[in-house]
Amino acid sequence: MKKQLFFQSAVVSTILSYFLIFVGGLVRVSGAGMGCPNWPKCGDGWMPPTNIDINQINTTLAWIEFTNRMFGVILGISIIILNVLAVFYFRKNYNLLFASILSLIFVIVNGVLGGVLVWFELNPYIKTVHMLFALILVSILSYICIKSYKMINTTLFKGLKKNPILSKSLIVFWILIVVEILLGTGIRTNLELVSIENPLLSKGELLNALDSYKYFHSFLGFTLFFLSAYIYSKLRTNKLYIARFLGIFILGMIVVQIFLGEMMIFFELPQLTRLFHTWGSSWLVGVVIILYNCISNEYDK
């Protein structure tokens, strides 16, 4: 019962963390980053105004940013509950206990970073660190999910054949997808800055104004495709259904992300396309952590 409760708590926290990334992306594409011009308050109060106040706060943008903050609070509460369960039930399971405490540290630090981001008026470097910490938090929570799931279903994971090359490939894949997401964040930030300084430039001219790392972003995307194809080829005959499913999910998601990325270069797609492009990529960060721990043979004794 306690294992099931802990697992369910971890799943809720992980889902909330992905929702927070989604809402954070919505803040980005809607331009609501300064919707609340200060932190932790929003204008003169703790709640956004219901109409334009004396400070000329845009109520729509303020509520989008406020929703992002509230999701952060809800996620923080869920992780506190997760830590309480870890302390009461898994004090001797140092991996789960440490991961739970680490998740609490990261959610607190990232919440503070969100405030710092407002104080420094959306500094692009702080924005990148903010995204990096969000991806690490998702990875930690995904790790807790799969580890607690394996405690409940130990028989499913017995007899797995160890594949060191595949495990190392997944580690490389995780690192590359995080780099790819951060590169994409940097490209969007630079496009916004160039656009502000040169409002008359076309989309093609804006892209030409970027540094050469825009090509590295595309190159890395295709590298991830070939690596995901290799990972799937090694998982096709795996006896564990979840491993086979995650293998095809990773490959399919990479194909979708490359397609969306290339479409955004050549066509004027809605801003929401950018949101789902980034959000879909963030799924891979947690999925790779889950898959890596699925194929480990810790229960093969």
Image: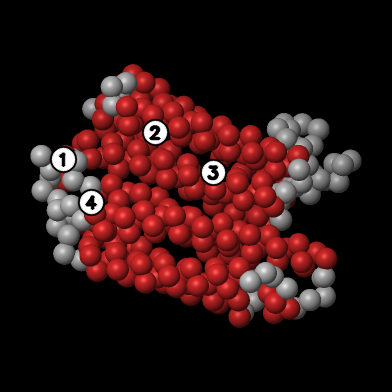
- Residue 179 position, x and y percent, is 51, 57
Q: CA distance from mark 3 to mark 4?
A: 26 Å
- From mark 2 to mark 4, how far is it between C-alphas? 20 Å
SS class, disc 1: loop
N-terminal-most mark, 2 or 4: 2
CB of mark 3 within 8 Å of CB of mark 4? no
> In the rendering, at what x and y percent does residue 35 appear?
74, 47
Residue type highlighted by circle 3: Phe
Q: Residues within 10 Å of mark 4 (few under 14, many from 20)?
A: many
Q: Which mark is residue 295?
A: 4
Residue under the image location 72 percent in, 49 percent down = 123
> Which residue is disc 2 drawn over?
99
Q: Which residue is mark 1?
A: 299
From the top left corner, tell me how far across and down residue 201 is, in percent. Answer: 79, 76
Give the amino acid at mark 4.
Answer: Ile
| Label 2: how many Cα within 10 Å (few below 14, some 14–19, many 20+) | some
> What separation in Å lies between label 1 and label 2 (alpha carbons)?
20 Å
Which residue is the extreme one toward the right?
54
Three-letter code, disc 2:
Ala
Mark 3 or mark 4: whose residue is earlier in sequence: 3
* Residue 72 relative to residue 138: left or right: right
For label 1, count other residues whose C-alpha is less than 10 Å away and answer few (under 14), some (14-19) or many (20+).
some
Residue drawn at x 23%, y 51% as measured from the top left: 295
Element marked by disc 3: helix
Residue identified by numbered label 3: 133
Question: Residue 6, relative to residue 169: is it above or below?
Answer: above
- What residue sits 28% from the left and 39% below the top? 147
Q: Are marks 1 and 3 in contact (CB under 8 Å)?
A: no
Image: 172 above or below 106: below
- Tell me which label, 2 or 3, sits earlier in the chain: 2
Which x, y percent locates residue 133?
Answer: 54, 43
